[in-house]
Every structure is written in structure tokens, then in C-alpha cells.
Image (cartoon, rainbow, N blue to C red):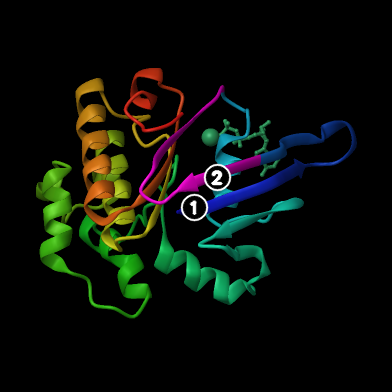
Amino acid sequence: MEVLKAVNLTKIYGKGENQVRALDGVSLSVEQGQFAAVVGTSGSGKSTLLHMLGGLDRPDKGKVYVDGKDIFSLKEEALTIFRRRKIGFVFQSYNLVPVLSVYENVALPVELDGKKADRAFIEEILDTLGILQKARSLPGQLSGGQQQRAAIARALASRPSILLCDEPTGNLDSRTSQDVLGLLKLSGQKVGQTIVMITHNEEIAQMADRI
Ligand code: ADP
Ligand code: MG
């Protein structure tokens, strides 16, 4: 079953001579439970594509369907709620809240949705990612790789049906990358999660079902 579909996405930044055509008629279809990797050089529009797929930014042209629903037909508030419940993001720049501990960061999306965070589940994710001992630390007290793993934990904590990851192993050494990828795959298989992952690492991309 097709859960995520992009049709003819176009996004242009800037005006006149400074205009950048970041996406030029991109179409893509992802099946439920599929683990798809998107590979491309720096500046080729990968992050822009991921932001559109998750409804974080609107395209100039084209549509995105999640479970057959045209997400950009939703009003801003409905889109926010939809995103929070359905989509997990791992941002290239982590986007952790600096004044909250790692645990609080991970629990935040669930709590923003008015639910109680599942402490045991969050601790299990942190443990698998090797950062449980950092649960009470602030993001600024963590290395880049540890912050990246905290961002991955946050995306997994709300058990989203679609996980969108922007270079999730960009700051990890090769062994940790394999471990993190293994965890993403496992988590995907366990709950039938669909994953779209951006990477420029060929070796990492090979672990996906589809490139
Ligand atoms: P990638 O993730 O593949 O490196 P991006 O999607 O970040 O590529 O960017 C694609 C192109 O769009 C680049 O040329 C980038 O400079 C440009 N771009 C991205 N975001 C913006 C923005 N907010 N304003 C202007 N240009 C942007
Ligand atoms: Mg990028």
C-alpha cells in the first residue's frame, strides 16, 4: 500500500538572478513499511524534498499525499497536528531544545500532543542508542554524534508511522552509523513504519530497501 506520494513538486527560492530551482517536478511514491534512501550531492534539493514530504514547508507547485490525503489542503493548525501525530523528523541540524534535558527533548513531541510520555519506552530507545546515561544532560553537554542520537530518539518516541531522516548518520562514526541504521530498520519492521532517509553515504544507502 502506498502511504506517501509526491506529485510534481516544484520549489523555487529567491528571485531574479538569485533564483534557485531546488525542486523541479519531483515525483515519488513510497509503500508502507518501505525503507527508502534518497542520495544526492550537496545542494541538490534533498532537505527541501524532505521538508515538503513532511509538510514543514509548502511547494510552489505539486502535491503531497499521505494515506491518500492531500496534506497541503489542510489549514496550518490541522497540518501541525497531523505532522505531530503521523511524522517523525530527524533534522540535519538536530533542532534539540537547548534548555531541556535529553529525556525532556525526547518526551516533548508526545507531551505537546497532550499525552503522557512512556518513560520505559523512551529509556529503552535511549539505551539502544547508547545515550541513556545522558538522559539528564543538556544537549550542549553532548557531542555531535550524541545529539544526533538524541534527535533520532525524539523522532522514534511518538511511534510515528512515517519517519523522515535528514542525514541521520552525518555525525556518527562508521560503527555507530551501522548500529543506528540497524535500530531504524528494526523499529521500522516492528511497527510497519515507513522510512525515507537522506544520505550522501553510499554504504549507508545500501542498507535501505530502495535507493
Ligand atoms: P541538499 O539538502 O541536497 O544539500 P537543499 O535542499 O538544502 O539541498 O538546498 C537545495 C538548494 O536550494 C540549494 O541551492 C540551497 O542553497 C537552496 N536553498 C535551500 N533552502 C533555501 C532557502 N531557505 N532560501 C534560499 N535558498 C535555499
Ligand atoms: Mg540537506
**Residue for point 86% across, 41% down:** 15
Provide the residue designation for mark 1: 2
Quadrant containing ligand 1: top right
Q: What element carries label 1?
A: strand
Identify the disc placed on residue 48.
Answer: none
Kindly identify the residue that appears in the image at 26 percent across and 51 percent down: 153
- Disc 1: CA contacts within 10 A as few (<14), some (14-19) or many (>=20): some
Circle 2/circle 1 CB separation < 8 Å? yes
Task: Describe residue 176's horizontal placement relative to residue 112 as left or right.
Answer: left
User: In 3D space, how far apart are the residues under numbered discs 2 and 1 (Cα atoms)?
Assistant: 7 Å
Total numbered circles: 2
Relative image position of residue 66 (x, y in whole percent): 53, 60
Three-letter code for the amino acid on which mark 1 is drawn: Glu
Q: In which image quadrant can residue 14 be found?
A: top right
Q: Is residue 193 left or right of residue 56?
A: left
The answer to whether 49 is drawn above or below residue 121 in the figure is above
Which range is magenta? 27-41
Reply above or below: 211 against 132: above
Quadrant that contains the N terminus: bottom left
Q: Position of residue 81 (x, y in %)?
A: 48, 73
Indicate whether residue 36 is drawn in magenta: yes
Q: How crowded is mark 2: few (under 14 residues within 10 Å), some or many (20 or more)?
A: some
Give the amino acid type for the residue marked by disc 2 in the picture: Ser
The x and y percentages for residue 29 are: 55, 45
What residue do we see at 50% from left, 62% from top?
Answer: 67
Residue ranking furthest to the right = 16
140 left or right, relative to 120: right
Question: Is 102 one of the magenta-colored residues?
Answer: no
Q: Residue furthest bottom?
A: 114
Question: Circle 2 is placed at which residue position?
Answer: 29
